[in-house]
Image (cartoon, rainbow, N blue to C red):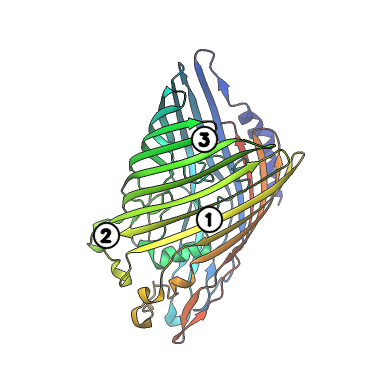
Amino acid sequence: MKKLLGIILAIVFLVAPALTFAQVEAAAGSMKFGAHVDISYLVSGQDNKDPEADEIGWVGYDSVNVQDVIIDLNGKIGDRISYRILQALVVENWVTGTGTAPDFTNNIGPVIDIHKELAQPGLPLEAWINFKVIDQLGFKFGKQITPTLIANTGAHIADVIHTVNFPLIAQNSYGLNGIASSQLVPALAGVRLPLSVTGASAILSFSGVEIVYTQFDSWLKAVDTDPNNGVLVDDAGYDSNKTKGGNVMVGYNGQVGSGKLNARTFYFDEDTELWPDKVWNSPNFARNSGWGLGAMYNADKFFAGGEYATATLKYDSKDPPLADINSNTYSGYYLIAGGRFSSIEVVYRLDSMDYNNFKEDDLYPGATPPVRTATTVSFKPTSVDGEIWHTIGVNYLINDQTTLLLNYVIKSPERAQGWVNGDWEKVKLPNTNEIALLLEVDAL
């Protein structure tokens, strides 16, 4: 606790005041410079250290992370041209996997590991030029954050989702069953919604309404290799190669009553070359498509909102390891509400996630379970599709740019079923609850 308090005090008194005034405006022309820093302290205790075959272990974590450091340069050239470069100097991602492989011959179950690692130094989130033909119509070219979920902000946390973790349906958020599902059926694990893509967009805006159509064709830099299958992965899910497609968003952002309403709906469809031929020596072309909707309402004394999204990943060919399957659909939602009392925010968020829509007959024709080996987790994928999180938080608004967030996250994954003694049985899950502390300095 002393270490934690020391870190917090150092950040608040030394780092935060400096970055609070990091935004400057050039005298000549219209140019602004901003900075954004997230520093987190995350704790989830180890549990089920030596699991038996019908149990799952949890490595846990206790770490201080410079979650991201982002700088922003934006401005205008005349009345019709604007530009932005949003550069991530440091970005950290969750890395997941099986910390200890199961050994069912000796009645030993798997241990799940999740931790944060430096993902992509020097990653540009946005680098675009926007040309306004008329006040209501513009065209944007370059790398840009795709308008899907409001929660997929790219940088902002405290003033958008008001909690330390992103929702389960958003970017860079993982639950226990999400990890288990991706280990059991890696080829069909849900691919995240498009976030930062390179392409062109047309933007029509009037009276608070905005309609955005984005056409993208991005080459995604691979940053890691999944040790379980040798496939290159990155922050977009398993988009290890090239992804191209389109996204359309219709939204409203304006004053409603005493507060501000941000509402939107979207649809995307992308072609994604997910898996190199060397893995299966088979066609690897897949299509990822989905839609979502949601709204956030912010007033002086309270805020409330929620979003829903669903996506389907479909291959041209069947998935060789899993009989007759060539697609998977995941869906989820979150609801959030909170109140403000002077410089204190109290917040509650509910997350619900379904990771797959597999059917038993598709996975195991004739009800035949998978063969146990020293590297295969013999759990039923249809039993790890659900997960619910409850997040309770208290936030301290230090000033307009600096917020300290303290969350307790109760994680309730659906209990998996394992093949034990010739039958499916409920397995014992570890306690993966989390205490999360985040200092956000946002001068973008």
Label 3 is placed on what type of residue? Val
Residue 412 sits above or below residue 302 on the image: below
Q: Where is residue 427 in the image (x, y as percent from the top left)?
A: 53, 77
| Real-space Cα separation, disc 2 to disc 1, in angstroms | 28 Å
Q: In this view, does 270 lie to the left or right of 115?
A: left
Label 2 is placed on what type of residue? Asp
Residue 171 appears in the picture as rendered: no
Q: Where is residue 372 in the image (x, y as percent from the top left)?
A: 38, 78
Q: Identify the disc placed on residue 209.
A: 3
Q: Is mark 2 on a helix, strand or loop?
A: loop
Contact (Cβ within 8 Å) of mark 2 with mark 3: no
Q: Where is residue 392 in the image (x, y as percent from the top left)?
A: 68, 54
Q: Identify the disc placed on residue 316.
A: 2
Residue bearing the label numbered 1: 168
Residue 329 appears in the picture as rendered: yes
In percent of the image, x 30 and y 71: which residue is there? 324
Q: Is residue 397 left or right of residue 273?
A: right
Of labels 2 and 3, earlier in sequence is 3
